């Protein structure tokens, strides 16, 4: 096998380099694959029958053709630059996840805090309107909103949400 490689490497590489358009790395890979196939078929090759270059060239040519077909059958690869130019698709998943997360966080607040946030933030009522709806003084609503927002922030941070 070593003698076969020494004798046919250069002429085979020259043929394959032309077939691969001068791509040296690809040509080297094809020559190596050709030599491996020759080694696997050594019992069928007749070293006394003349030059093995035609057989090696045919094998190498088929390898190049197979490589080209394989590359053309596969869609071209793209880098990440093309992905960065794609518009963001709003599928509502982020909003849904955010809603679930806030709903779960609100469940961990005290009923008084949850109630005051529901009136002021979710129902978009003023402090005076929330106080009237809840039947508590305006100052109490203001105080509860302040502490409820702080408690909600702590709960969200525990869930891994950063602001």
Image (cartoon, rainbow, N blue to C red):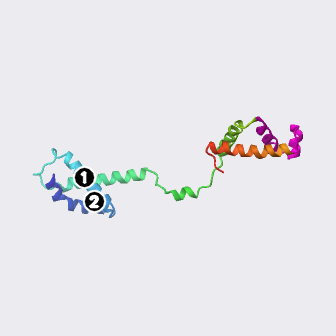
Residue segment shown in magenta: 111-138
Residue ID for mark 2: 16
Residue 110 relative to residue 61: left or right: right
Asked if residue 155 lies left or right of residue 64, the reply is right
Percent position of residue 26, x then y: 32, 58
| Residue 49 sits inside the magenta stretch | no
Q: Is residue 76 left or right of residue 22?
A: right
Label 1: element kind: helix
Query: Pointers 1 and 2 in contact (CB under 8 A)?
Result: yes
Count of numbered badges drawn on the protein: 2
Q: In this orientation, which residue lies closer to the viewer: 159 or 39?
A: 159
Label 2 crowd bin: few (<14), some (14–19), many (20+), radius 10 Å: many
Query: Measured along the vertical axis of the image, is residue 65 above or below residue 154?
Result: below
Whole-percent x, y for residue 20 in the image = 32, 60
Quarter-of-image position of residue 17: bottom left
Write the residue at 28% across / 55% down: 30
Residue found at x 77% / y 39%: 113
List the residue tagged with mark 1.
34
């Amino acid at each position: 096998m070593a003698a076969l490689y020494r004798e046919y490497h250069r002429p085979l590489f020259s043929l394959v380099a032309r077939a691969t358009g001068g791509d040296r790395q690809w040509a080297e890979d094809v020559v190596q694959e050709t030599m491996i196939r020759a080694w696997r078929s050594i019992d069928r090759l007749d070293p006394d029958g003349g030059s093995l270059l035609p057989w090696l060239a045919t094998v190498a040519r088929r390898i190049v053709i197979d490589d080209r077909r394989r590359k053309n059958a596969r869609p071209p690869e793209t880098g990440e630059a093309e992905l960065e130019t794609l518009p963001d698709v709003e599928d509502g998943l982020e909003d849904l996840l955010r809603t679930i997360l806030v709903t779960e966080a609100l469940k961990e607040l005290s009923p008084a805090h949850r109630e005051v946030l529901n009136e002021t933030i979710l129902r978009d009522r003023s402090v005076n309107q929330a106080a009237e709806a809840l039947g508590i003084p305006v100052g109490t609503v203001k105080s509860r909103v302040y502490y409820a927002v702080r408690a909600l922030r702590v709960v969200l941070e525990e869930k891994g949400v950063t602001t």
